[in-house]
């Protein structure tokens, strides 16, 4: 299985500010994804992080609000911009290895916006 | 539009007995199905998966059954152990592992 780490593990942020979450995967991973889990809800895919190019966003998510970078194969960042209390969620990074179908998840970043 | 549904929010089972978690889906284009287990303050952990061309996959105490005509899958855990107590998520993909769509989750409690 792939090893995936995220930081920070949690943060409390003020309304209107931005937070960048980092995700590091081991070298087996070729595909990387970002998910959100709002309180009491399931996981929702935000976007696929593409190496060296713009991320592919799912319906309801836009680049201005959730800019994503993936400068190399093993590292990606998600920024939550101009935060509001509705952005309070757990943000999770995942990876999938070439030839495998399952995704492996990082421990998540718990974000609280006040 | 909830494409993957887990209609039981919670399930309580006695240690040693079978746990059966259910999942229904609506999108006939799903080609791969997965089960994840999640403990509080941790990311989901992959458990077991099944391709849409199969109807059963087994891995130790875990077995997943797929009924394509009914658009239904289930996860069987035998025997259940107290350490199995967690939230279980059903997930489905239309791109063989990409773009996972998750169900709402079922809280499993295994009583000793």
Image (cartoon, rainbow, N blue to C red):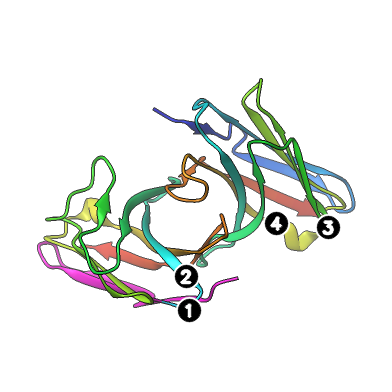
Marked residue nearer the N-terminal end (4 or 3): 3
Residue at the disc numbered 3: B60
C-alpha distance separating marks 2 and 4: 29 Å
Mark 1 touching mark 3, by CB under 8 A? no
SS state under label 4? loop
Contact (CB < 8 A) between labels 2 and 1? yes
Residue at the spot of label 1: A26
Label 3: chain? B
Please give the range of residues in magenta. A1-24
Residue that badge 4 annotates: B85
Front one among B8 and A76: A76
Q: Which mark is residue A29?
A: 2
Q: Above or below — where is B4 with respect to B97? A: above
Residue A18 seen from this side: yes
Q: CA distance from mark 2 to mark 1?
A: 6 Å
Query: Is residue B83 on the magenta stretch?
Result: no
Indicate the secondary structure of the residue bearing disc 2. strand
Q: Where in the figure is residue A89, as x and y percent of width and height?
A: 34, 57
């Amino acid at each position: 299985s792939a090893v995936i780490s995220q930081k920070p593990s949690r943060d409390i942020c003020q309304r209107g500010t931005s937070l960048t979450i980092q995700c590091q995967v081991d070298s087996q991973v070729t595909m990387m994804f970002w998910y959100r889990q709002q309180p009491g809800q399931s996981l929702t895919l935000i976007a696929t992080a593409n190496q060296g190019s713009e991320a592919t966003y799912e319906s309801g998510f836009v680049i201005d609000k959730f800019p994503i970078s993936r400068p190399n194969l093993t590292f990606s960042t998600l920024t939550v911009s101009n935060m509001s209390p509705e952005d309070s969620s757990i943000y999770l990074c995942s990876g999938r290895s070439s030839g495998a179908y399952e995704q492996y998840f990082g421990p998540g970043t718990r974000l609280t916006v006040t | 539009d909830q494409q993957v549904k887990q209609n039981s929010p919670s399930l309580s089972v006695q240690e040693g007995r079978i746990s059966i978690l259910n999942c229904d889906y609506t999108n006939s284009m799903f080609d791969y199905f997965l089960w994840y287990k999640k403990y509080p303050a941790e990311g989901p952990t992959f458990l077991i998966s099944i391709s849409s061309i199969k109807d059963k996959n087994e891995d130790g105490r875990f077995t997943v059954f797929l009924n394509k005509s009914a658009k239904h899958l289930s996860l069987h855990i035998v025997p259940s152990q107290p350490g199995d107590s967690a939230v279980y998520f059903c997930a489905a993909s239309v791109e063989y592992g990409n773009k996972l769509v998750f169900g709402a989750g079922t809280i499993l409690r295994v009583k000793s």
